Image (cartoon, rainbow, N blue to C red):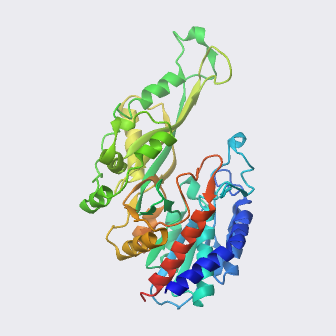
Amino acid sequence: MADMLSELDRYIEEHLAESLEDLRRLTAIPSVSSKGEGIADAANFVRDLLEGEGFEAKVMPTDGNPVVYADSGERGNASPTLLCYNHYDVQPAEPLDLWDSPPFELTERDGRVYARGVSDDKGQLISRIAAIRAVRAVAGGLPQRVKFLVEGEEEVSSPSLDAFIEANRDLLAADACVWEFGGVDPDGRPEVVLGLRGILYVEYRVRTLSRDAHSGSAHNLPNAAWRLVRALNTIQAADGRVLIPGFYDAVKGPTDTDLQLMAGMPSSEAFNREHFGVKEFVNGHTEMDYITAVFEPTANIAGIGAGWQGQGSKTVIPAYAMAKMDFRLVPDQDPDDLFARLRKHLDEQGFSDVEVVKLGGERSAVTPGDDPFVQLTARLASEVYGKPAVIDPLVGGTGPVYPFRAYLGTPIVTLGPGDPLSNAHSPNESMSIEAFKLGTHHMARLLLEYGAQS
């Protein structure tokens, strides 16, 4: 095995330029799902890339953007079968003036490559393809069947994926799933994430006048901004607790296993304090409170606007105001149920005039920390990175884990080339080339050892 691992390392290093060229071509496609740009081009490129690696691949329609499905066919229907979930869509690149290089032109500097989607999620996808390429070259083939599901709506809450997975359970059947992202913590320790929070994303709209008015009439004319602020003030208390009746009914909190895993986790509070310039975290969280707070749902104002926002003064009464809010949800909370509760709450508080539009919703799901696939992935991570792996039962972000757990029953793990400096969703998104090689080697090791269990 030691000789084969050395061969894997050598192959990944010798073919790094080929992998980065694949990444350059993929990141050059501005596949921004929120704008509907580059979707067909990206889906077709991913299909062609997987076909070039010997997969039977096809672009399949959904109610929204298409998915790319691919099957290696190795070992027929023999167990185990590994499913890789990724996405080809990316966040908008704006604000463009904050980029140091063109967002859709892969640029290398100081050991990192920069482009929109290079970390989230195109670099992760290319890393997995590079691992498959290496294993096939060194071992003479894949020791198990591998499938890919690459969607095009992850960055807009995957509205079509749930129905697609439910309708294609047999096609997607697998024994385990490697999730879209993965990487290391601020100290370079590999992280294996087991669960993601859910989300309910809404937009509030208030109109009090037919048009903006002179603020000299503020003693008589209603202000849409004040109306919206007062409505928002009924949703969350000063300590962050959501005030919608029944919002916490399904919340169970972390299990004993979750608490044991989190007790062994290093805290990122010092890194985030410096990285974001934080003086005090929410409710003064430190140490274990900082770590376990992820099991509390949240209500976050993601954007707000009304009236004059240009340079200088303009004395107006805003006729219209809007705000966007995301509720991050924990296991067993249902976004549809909570949306209905939100509407009822506003009505009962006297804000029936405040329009609420649901822009997205996903449920949370987790994989048990004692699952054998989790333990295998963590052990291999420790061996590849030379540092103990951190098993994180739940992270604050959201992804479509629920249909995988509900319809396919697969345990889910993360691994890959991400790191805290990747700036995913932000200007100057990047990926460390060294992290790409390590993440690729970790995936290759997993392919070898998981396949050997059949």
> Where does the C terminus fall, quadrant-wise?
bottom left
Vertical relation: 402 (above or below) 293: below
Front-lying residue, 395 or 200: 395
Residue at 54% across, 77% down:
444
Circle count: 0
Is residue 122 left or right of 21 when viewed as pictured?
A: left
Quadrant of res 105: bottom right
Vertical relation: 11 (above or below) 324: below
Horizontal and vertical percent position of residue 373: 39, 75
Front-lying residue, 277 or 324: 277
Residue at 68% across, 54% down:
36
Front-lying residue, 383 or 153: 383
Residue lying furthest left: 256
Horizontal and vertical percent position of residue 240: 36, 36
Horizontal and vertical percent position of residue 427: 65, 46
Front-lying residue, 229 or 276: 276
Residue 146 in view:
yes
Is residue 414 left or right of 17 when viewed as pictured?
A: left
Vertical relation: 44 (above or below) 354: below
Residue at 68% across, 21% down:
311
Residue 172 in view:
no
Is residue 332 left or right of 61 when viewed as pictured?
A: left
Horizontal and vertical percent position of residue 196: 43, 58
Vertical relation: 239 (above or below) 77: above
